[in-house]
Structures are given as structure tokens and as C-alpha cells.
Image (cartoon, rainbow, N blue to C red):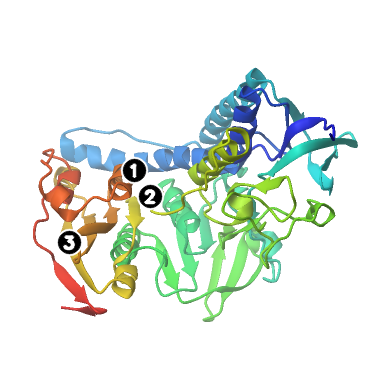
Amino acid sequence: MTSYDYDLFVIGGGSGGVRSGRVAASLGKKVGIAEEFRYGGTCVIRGCVPKKLYVYASMFSTDFQDAEGFGWTVGETSFDWHKLVAAKETEITRLEGLYQKGLANAGADIFHSRAELVGPNSIKLLSTGQIVTAERIVIAVGGRPSPHDALPGSALAITSNEVFDLPELPRSILIAGGGYIAVEFANILHGLGVETTLIYRGKEILSRFDRDMRQGLHKAMVDKGIRILCEDIIETISDGEHGGRQVTTLKGEILTVDQVMLALGRVPNTQGLGLDAAGVKTDHQGAIIVDAFSRTSAPGIYALGDVTNRVQLTPVAIHEAMCFIETEYKGNPTSPDHDLIATAVFSQPEIGTVGLSEDEAAQTLGDVEIYRTEFRPMRATLSGRSEKTIMKLVVNAADRKVVGAHVLGPSAGEMAQLLGISLKAGVTKDDFDRTMAVHPTASEELVTMYAPSYRIRNGERV
């Protein structure tokens, strides 16, 4: 019987890696885990958590304005970027400590080092040159912003990695991209007082979301002063005056801004990981190819989270980690369930969504009912703000099953979590109809849309 240094060795200290390592160690397995940067991964260190903190910070500018409509007199206000960055750093350092404490308390060996595969069951820790062996290896190194090296001047731009810790808050910024990262940071920076422009090659931002959510958010962003350039791309970035950047676009526009941020997708972080030495296959994007149980092409090696490019969301990585534990250490083969994943865009207003969009349903179902409402949220009635909330249910007319739910408005992300439970349980429109409303709330509209706004039959609106 082969003897190994570890029952399990995890490469990557993000959400999926830490969860799999900590739980395996708590089950009595000898576990080692290595992280080259900071424990917590993208989500905790330079992703979801600091982003949401910055979202909160950016909302105060409109909160101060809205307060007057409710009888408050707000004096002169100012914003200190350095205080926000320092407060963020304190919080993520606390969370990083909790991640490591959980691993240590479970009995895992923690390494602060880059780790690379040097054979089927062998890992090299680059900080010391030590080689360790493991019966099972989990690769959970996540992803990184796509560098777009082919873009002339790309080295002059920043990505979502750097934006949290800029030495100074720019006066103006051009953000390239139309996905949720680009859209969220456009709203964050605008809310902090930065003159913000978004440039995107597509006809509409958030191309994978329901059309009403995309169009509603686009209008809200433009109405509050964010400039959006669709069907255009950056052609070159060069040094501008006083340390700024000059950008030329495909349509011939010349923009002068303090900063350029590229938010043009993310790629799996597999470069230089030694995958070939271990016999681990990847696809054309560098993502590790796995089967339904997160097993790679190499026996005993598994991959979780963004590095597999299945669904790039933190809760998905954690779910995949728990399925790995069930399968490998509890004798309960469990495949990750990637169907009906609720998600949110923390823009302003927020988007919360789960299930099929209207267009997707129209393409896959013969007869679809659309229930849609648009209204001014109660808070906006006294503040005088014109922003609208949009809610939408997509229903399969054949069995009345709700196959999609979409919300644009305050707290949409919170609603999406609960809608996700309902759709996962197979809720029908009749279930919505017989549910009593909670008044006065925005979410009551979800259970008071009794008649369809319109129907789609065989792809045609009727």
C-alpha cells in the first residue's frame, strides 16, 4: 500500500479550497493546503466582500440627497477614499484570519506558498522547494482578470484586482466591459464621485440577463450620469497629460481619463501550475476539464470552482467542495447541481435573477406567459427620485410552472435568494397567486400579478 504525506492536499486557499480542506480535516483526514497570496481567495480579498463594502460606501451619496425629502437637513459632506480602503483592509484581514483559524482548528497544515504539481501525486512548495505527496489533490486556484495583452497599451490599464487599492481615487475613469463586474464598478465609482464612462462591444449591457433587467438598468445608469458607449471598443490606450490616459475607440472617439479599467472577463488561473506533469487536461481557455464529480483526467486529482470555468460564483465553489467531501469521504456520490442558480448584480439599482429569461423561455418552450410590473418604489415618492423597480415572472403555460423570476430594484439580490428556493422547489404561478402579500413591500408585487402581461407562442408575442 502506497504511503503519502497527506490524505488530501489542496492547492488554493479560496472559498472552495478552504471548505474542502477544513471539512476533510475535521473528518480526521491529514490535510495540507497551500495559498500563494492571501487566504480567502478572490471573493474575500479582491472580489465579492470588498466589492459589497464599496457598494455600501457609494450609496451614501444618494442617501444624503434623498434625506431632504424626508425632512432631514444634511450639511456639507465629503468622502475620504483612504479611510474606505483602510476600513476595507481591516475587515478582509479579519476574515482572512477566520479562514486560517478554521483550518488550523480542524488540524490542517497551512502553507503560505505557491504550489505546483510535479507528478500524479506530488506537489512542490516553491517557498521552500519541499515536495510533498498526497493520495488526493484538489485544485482550487480560481481565476484572474483577462489581461488582454493584444490590446495596445493594456499595461496602462487596471483590473478589478487593483481597483480596490488605488493610491488615489481618480477624477474620471473609462471601464471596458458589459458584464456584472464592469457594471457594478461603474455604479460604485460614480457613487463615489468619479466621472464614469462604460464602453461595451455589445448592443446592450449584461447580455446574458433578461432584456427588461438590462434595459431598465441601462436607463437608470444613464439617468444618473453614467455615460454608456455600446457597440464600441477600445483600440489603443496611451499616456495622457498629468499621468492620465488617452483612449481611442473603434468608432474614432478620443477620451481622456485618469484611469482605464478592463473588465473583459476572467480566465482560469492554471498557467504554470504543472498540470501537464500530472496528466491533468485543460480546454482551449485553460480551464481544467472535470466530470460530473469534479474529477480531472488524472486519477486522484480534482478541481473545484472558477478554475473549471463551470459557473464562476463563490457559493458554487463551496457547493462543489461539499459534493467532493460527500463523494470521496462519506461514501455518498454527489454531483454538483448547477441548475437554477440564483444570482445578483450589485448595481444601483440591483438585479436579482433566477431561471430562464423571457428570450430563453421563448426559444425552449412552446407557450409562455409573462407577468411584468413596473413601479416607483415607495422610498422614491418622497425623495423625488425617478428610478423604477421592475419585476417579472416567466411561466410555462403548459403546467403553470414558474421557470424564471427577475427583479430590478432595491434589495433585488435578497429577493433572488428566496425566489431561488421557490423555483428550485418547482413552484407554480398558482402557488404565487394563493400566497398572501406582505404590505407595504416591493416584493408583494410578485404575488399580486394575477393576469399575464402578454404571452409568447412558438416564439411570437401574442
Quarter of the image where the C terminus is located:
bottom left
Check the image and report above or below for 102 versus 142: above
Question: Is 135 on the left or on the right of 255, as rendered?
Answer: right
* Observer able to see residue 384: yes
Q: Kindly identify the residue that appears in the image at 42 percent across and 67 percent down.
A: 207
Q: In which quarter of the image is residue 121?
A: top right
Identified by mark 1, the residue type is Gln
The disc, 2 or 3, on the residue closer to the chain's N-terminal end is 2
Kindly identify which residue carries mark 3: 371
Identified by mark 3, the residue type is Tyr
Kindly identify which residue carries mark 1: 417
**In what element is the residue under mark 3?**
strand
Residue 12, disc: none
Q: How far apart are marks 2 and 3 (CA)?
A: 19 Å
Residue that protrudes farthest toward the right in the picture: 129
Residue sitting nearer the eye, 71 or 92: 92
**In what element is the residue under mark 2?**
loop
Quarter of the image where the N terminus is located:
top right
Kindly identify which residue carries mark 2: 342
Residue 228 location (% of width, % of height): 42, 67
Q: Distance between the residues labelled 1 and 3?
A: 19 Å
Check the image and report above or below for 378 versus 94: below
Are discs 1 and 2 less than 8 Å apart at CB?
yes
**In what element is the residue under mark 1?**
helix
The disc, 1 or 2, on the residue closer to the chain's N-terminal end is 2
Q: Kindly identify the residue that appears in the image at 79 percent across and 36 percent down.
A: 134
Q: How far apart are marks 1 and 2 (CA)?
A: 6 Å
Q: Kindly identify the residue that appears in the image at 13 percent across and 38 percent down.
A: 438
Task: Check disc 2: other Cα within 10 Å, few if <14, some if 14-19, many if 20+.
Answer: many
Task: Check disc 3: other Cα within 10 Å, few if <14, some if 14-19, many if 20+.
Answer: many
Q: In which quarter of the image is residue 239?
A: bottom right
Number of numbered discs on residues: 3
